[in-house]
Image (cartoon, rainbow, N blue to C red):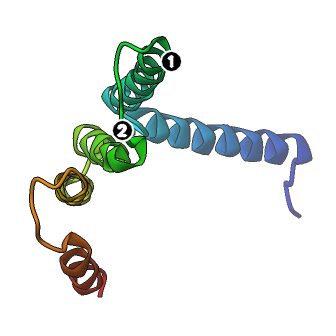
Amino acid sequence: MNDFDPQQFRDEVTNDIHRRMRRRRERFRHRRRHSPIGGVIIGTAILLAGVLFLLQNFGLVHVRNLWEYWPVWMIAWGIAGVTGAGHASGRVWGGVIATAGTLLLLNNLHIISTNVWGILWPLLLIVVG
């Protein structure tokens, strides 16, 4: 004769489910998804762009071509990746993005005269491959 108690079975299954959910919650709580520093860097970049537009509208600053400064976003994104990465691979990719952005910005501002695109695209294919 089997002594199967449906109430006891239900309680054991419920307790097991709750115990597993608590373990997952505790593991998830210890993982950091994003660094607050990364958000501060991106927010500061957006704020500076807004200030630049406002000063240009007031006639205090003359920016000849704002499109030349687009690599600043890559630099900010790379720095945010370096500061907010929990793993070494995230820091490396953040550094690569920031370096590429710096090279593109220097090229756009005519500080360096090398064809940066001609160097970055093959390197990107090598790194990804």
Q: Nearer the viewer, residue 12 or 129?
A: 129
Residue 52: which quarter of the image? top left
Residue 44 in the figure: left or right of residue 20:
left
Indicate the position of residue 89 as horizontal and vertical percent values.
23, 60
Image quadrant where one finds the C terminus: bottom left
Q: Nearer the viewer, residue 37 or 88?
A: 37
Q: Nearer the viewer, residue 126 or 31?
A: 126
Residue displayed at 41% across by 48% down: 67
Task: Confirm or deny contact between disc 2 and disc 1 (CB under 8 A).
Answer: no
Determine crowd level at label 2: few under 14, some 14-19, many 20+ residues with C-alpha closer than 10 A.
few
Identity, as a three-letter code, of the amino acid under mark 1? Asn
Residue displayed at 29% across by 85% down: 125
Indicate the position of residue 70 as horizontal and vertical percent values.
38, 48
| Residue 17 in the image: above or below residue 103 | above
Indicate the position of residue 31 as horizontal and vertical percent values.
39, 39
Residue displayed at 87% across by 47% down: 5
Image quadrant where one finds the N terminus: bottom right
Residue 123 in the figure: left or right of residue 74:
left
The residues tagged by marks 2 and 1 sit, at their Cα atoms, a distance apart of 13 Å
Report the number of numbered marks.
2
Determine crowd level at label 1: few under 14, some 14-19, many 20+ residues with C-alpha closer than 10 A.
few
Identity, as a three-letter code, of the amino acid under mark 2? Arg
Q: Nearer the viewer, residue 60 or 33?
A: 60
Disc assigned to residue 47: none
- Element class at badge 2: loop
* Residue wearing tag 1: 57
Residue displayed at 40% across by 41% down: 66
| Residue 51 in the image: above or below residue 113 | above
* Residue wearing tag 2: 64
Indicate the position of residue 106 as horizontal and vertical percent values.
16, 53
- Element class at badge 1: helix
Instruction: Give the mark nearer the N terminus: 2 vs 1.
Output: 1
